[in-house]
Structure formats: C-alpha cells, structure tokens
Image: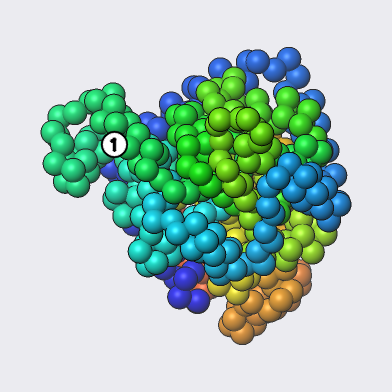
C-alpha cells in the first residue's frame, strides 16, 4: 500500500474514535444543518435553480477556452493584468515578481483555497514577506500553524474554548475571553495590518467573462479591505472559476451562500473590474488576476469526470458526508477534502498516490443530493475507481485476488460445493484484516439462495 494511503487509514482510525473531535464536529455541523435548512426556504423551486446553475457551469466547462479568453480581454480592457500560471511554482514565481516590482514587504490575505493549493504563505515567509490571513477562521488556523480543516469554515474543528486557549498561548490574552471579545481584539489588530499592507491577495469566487470582473463573497468585510486598501491587488483563481455573465450572479450568489453557510446572501459581495480609474479615490492602483491550471486540465480531459470542475466550493458535500464527519478534514492531507476533494485530488495530485480517496466513501449519495450545481459526486468516485484499476494502480496480489474470486463467484458448481461454514472460514481468512475489528463481519448463510430455492421448489 502506498505510504500516503497507509497514513490516511491510520489517521482515519484515530480520528473516528476521537470523541472530543467528534463532539466538536457534530456541534458545528449541527449548527450548519439548522442554518442550511433555513437558507433553502428562500427557494420556491430549489431543483430548478440547481439545474440552471448546473447548465451554466456545464456550458462553461465545455467551452472554457472561449470564456477564459473573453475574461482576459475584458479584464485587460478594464485596466487589469491577467497572468496565466501552469502550476503552483509558476503562480508563486509570478506573485514574487509583482512583490519585487513593488518592493513590497507586507501582504494581507483573504481566505482562499487556491492560495492554500499553491502553499503561498509558507513560500512568502521563506522570502521574508509578512503574509497575514485576515479572515478570522483562517487567522486562527494560521496562528495555530495548521492547514484549514474545511473549505468554507477553516477552524471548524476548534471549540470556542480551544480558540480562547490558543490566543492565550500565542498572544497572552485572557483565557476567559468570549468569542465576541476575541473577535473585537483581532479586528483591532488586523485594522493596522490593512493600513500598512503593500499588497492584498484574494481568491475569486467567480471570474465574470462578459464584464471582465472578479466577484468576491465573504462575511467579515476583510475581503473588501484586502482588495481595496493596499495599492496592489492580486486575485488568484483556478481556470474553472468562470461564469459567463454578471447576470449569472443573481443565481450563483444565493446558491453559494445558502449551501455554504445557510445564509440567504453572504454579508459582503464585491465585484471588482480592474484598478481604480480616473478620479476614483478607492481601490487598488494595480490589479492582477493569476489564472491557475495546476493539473485542472487533466480533469478537463476526462469526459465523464470533467463536470467536477463545475464546483463552486460551497462545502455542502463535506458537511453531508458521513466519512468526512468521522475522519475530519485534516486526515485527507489534500487542499480539497470531503467528496469533492476525493473526486478531484487523484487527478490534480496523481492517481497513484491519491486513488485511495475515491475508495473512502460509503457511496450513500448524500453529497450528490446537496450539491447546488448537481455534480454526481458519488458516481464520479466510482468512475475514479474504474480508472485507477484501468491505469493499473493496483497491486499484483489485488489483481490475483479479484481474478480468482470472480472466477469462483461466477461458477455455480464451485459456489455450492463448499458449505456455509467453509465459506465463512475462507472469507474471514482473506478479508478479515481489511474489514477491521470494529464491526461485525456479516455471516454467510449455511445454504446459498440457489440451494434454498432448490429445496423449497422440490
Ligand atoms: S461539489 Fe458541489 S457541494 Fe461540494 S463543494 Fe462543490 S459545489 Fe459544493
């Protein structure tokens, strides 16, 4: 078994039996579930909204080449600069070039999974650049020197007591501070960072092709400040973040907010169309968008799985997934976790090392059911499994076992030759270890269905 898969299994086992972890996740996802239910009440016909969103995103994914060029042209006409990055290394290099050009020393950041994907903070730190996360959850995770636990709520695995303790350890603040008091103190600290930052870096929830704009969605106002206060704004986005028209936000903004946090609309929604112009007094003087591929084209090349690029990163499939809820976000050791992570990571990081994620599913379909853009996630997990086998990412023992057992199972005479007791013995001998000690192995009946049928209809 590859090392990464082995670590995943060991870590999953630890987390699944960690009661404190389970209680925190259940509490936080319980709160999300209640809000999610309320957020959906704004829809008279949710299914229709989801179908429309799925159609638009399908169209985009199938014509990405055209939409991306439209975006580039329109954003450039607005005075912005588009940079194409083939992988994480190139994206980091381009960001560093901008930083050097502006002799920047201080960066403020808005929460962005794409910057997590290219490990930007660690890179900037090595270059001697201060890079501060300004979303409260992300700030907490940065302070704790951890990776985000969830694509929408990065500190979901921490209770309010854990967070108070963290600020006590790192900042010397009183351990008994309430969440409101902590928020107020962080707010003051960050205000200073915004004033003094040379560059603001954000992700992009959507890149709007027809107006050449970036749409940002957030709840704390830190995104607006990150984008508008420093003289330079860099947005980094995957190639799939395109939507055709500004009018589509009418559909996508409420879908993202209701599925992401259960809100009818997120508190702050900004549309940025290039740098400040003419006599405008607000906004960055220079505005860049880095469009990142980073193996997304591998996924695009898969006719059946490419629709996973429709994802709007709402996180609803993570919250619905029984596997995610038990093993937690960090266990995946990928930027994107949960069902969507299990579908896309093998293509983005390599099937050989990450195929195990497509097998870590009950295939219950809860993820597919909640997805606002109707990605058939559990079907895609099966397709990934098929492709992993077709690409021969299986051991010779697995291949021999599957070949042998299918020969045996397809042969009625052999099936009836052994008694239930013998079958039980062999099955437990072969797969008991895989089945694990924490669940009871289902017994094999003494008589097969074929034998019972024969006996009944003598
Ligand atoms: S796959 Fe669907 S449910 Fe999961 S994060 Fe993406 S849009 Fe949301």
- The residue lying furthest to the bottom in this view is 396
Does residue 199 appear in the picture of this structure?
yes
Q: Mark 1, residues whose alpha carbon is within 10 Å: few (<14), some, or many (≥20)?
A: few
Colouring method of the image = rainbow
Q: Is residue 202 above or below residue 372?
A: below
Would residue 179 appear left or right of 324 to someone viewing this image? left
Would residue 193 appear left or right of 46 to someone viewing this image? left
- Measured as percent of width and height from the top left, residue 406 is found at 71, 72
- Measured as percent of width and height from the top left, residue 185 is found at 25, 31
User: Which residue: 22% across, 36% down?
Assistant: 164
- Measured as percent of width and height from the top left, residue 370 is found at 64, 34
- Measured as percent of width and height from the top left, residue 42 is found at 65, 15
User: Which residue: 61% across, 84% down?
Assistant: 396
Would residue 249 appear left or right of 437 to someone viewing this image? right
Quadrant of the rendered structure where residue 215 is?
A: top right
- The residue lying furthest to the front in this view is 279
Q: Is residue 267 above or below residue 111?
A: above
Q: How many marks?
A: 1
| Mark 1, residue position | 189
Q: Would you say the beta carbon of the disc 1 residue lies within 8 angstroms of ligand 1?
A: no
Name the element at disc 1.
helix
Q: Nearer the viewer, residue 299 or 287?
A: 287
Quadrant of the rendered structure where residue 283 is?
A: top right
User: Which residue: 29% across, 36% down?
Assistant: 189
Q: Is residue 407 above or below residue 226?
A: below
Does residue 146 appear in the picture of this structure?
no
User: Which residue: 51% across, 44% down?
Assistant: 231
Quadrant of the rendered structure where residue 254 is?
A: top right
Q: Nearer the viewer, residue 364 or 229?
A: 229
Would residue 31 appear left or right of 306 to someone viewing this image? left
């Amino acid at each position: 078994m590859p090392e990464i898969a082995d670590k995943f299994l060991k870590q999953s086992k630890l987390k699944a039996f960690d009661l404190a972890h389970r209680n925190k996740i259940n509490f936080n996802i319980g709160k999300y579930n209640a809000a999610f239910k309320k957020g959906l009440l704004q829809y008279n016909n949710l299914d229709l909204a989801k179908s429309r969103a799925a159609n638009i995103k399908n169209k985009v994914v199938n014509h990405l080449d055209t939409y991306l060029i439209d975006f580039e042209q329109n954003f450039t006409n607005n005075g912005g600069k588009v940079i194409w990055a083939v992988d994480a290394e190139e994206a980091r290099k381009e960001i560093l070039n901008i930083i050097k050009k502006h002799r920047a020393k201080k960066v403020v950041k808005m929460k962005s999974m794409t910057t997590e994907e290219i490990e930007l903070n660690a890179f900037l730190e090595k270059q001697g650049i201060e890079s501060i996360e300004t979303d409260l959850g992300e700030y907490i995770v940065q302070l704790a020197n951890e990776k985000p636990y969830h694509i929408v709520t990065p500190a979901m695995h921490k209770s309010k007591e854990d967070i108070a303790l963290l600020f006590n350890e790192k900042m010397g603040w009183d351990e008994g501070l309430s969440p409101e008091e902590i928020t107020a103190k962080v707010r003051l600290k960050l205000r200073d960072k915004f004033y003094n930052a040379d560059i603001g870096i954000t992700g992009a929830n959507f890149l709007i092709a027809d107006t050449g704009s970036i749409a940002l969605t957030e709840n704390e106002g830190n995104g607006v400040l990150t984008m508008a206060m420093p003289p330079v704004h860099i947005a980094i986005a995957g190639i799939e973040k395109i939507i055709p028209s500004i009018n589509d936000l009418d559909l996508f903004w409420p879908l993202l907010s209701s599925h992401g946090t259960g809100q009818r609309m997120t508190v702050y929604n900004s549309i940025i169309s290039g740098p400040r112009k003419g006599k405008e007094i607000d906004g960055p003087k220079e505005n860049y968008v880095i469009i990142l591929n980073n193996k997304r084209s591998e996924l695009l090349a898969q006719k059946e799985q490419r629709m996973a690029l429709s994802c709007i990163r709402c996180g609803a499939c993570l919250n619905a997934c029984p596997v995610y809820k038990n093993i937690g976000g960090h266990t995946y050791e990928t930027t994107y976790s949960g069902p969507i992570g299990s579908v896309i990571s093998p293509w983005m990081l390599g099937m050989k090392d990450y195929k195990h994620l497509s097998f870590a599913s009950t295939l219950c379909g809860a993820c597919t059911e909640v997805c606002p853009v109707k990605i058939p996630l559990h079907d895609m997990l099966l397709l990934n499994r098929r492709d992993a086998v077709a690409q021969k990412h299986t051991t010779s023992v697995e291949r021999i076992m599957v070949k042998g057992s299918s020969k045996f199972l397809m042969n009625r005479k052999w099936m009836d030759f052994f008694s239930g007791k013998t079958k039980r013995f062999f099955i437990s001998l072969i797969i008991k270890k895989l089945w694990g000690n924490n669940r009871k192995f289902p017994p094999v009946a003494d008589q097969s269905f074929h034998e019972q049928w024969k006996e009944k209809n003598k």
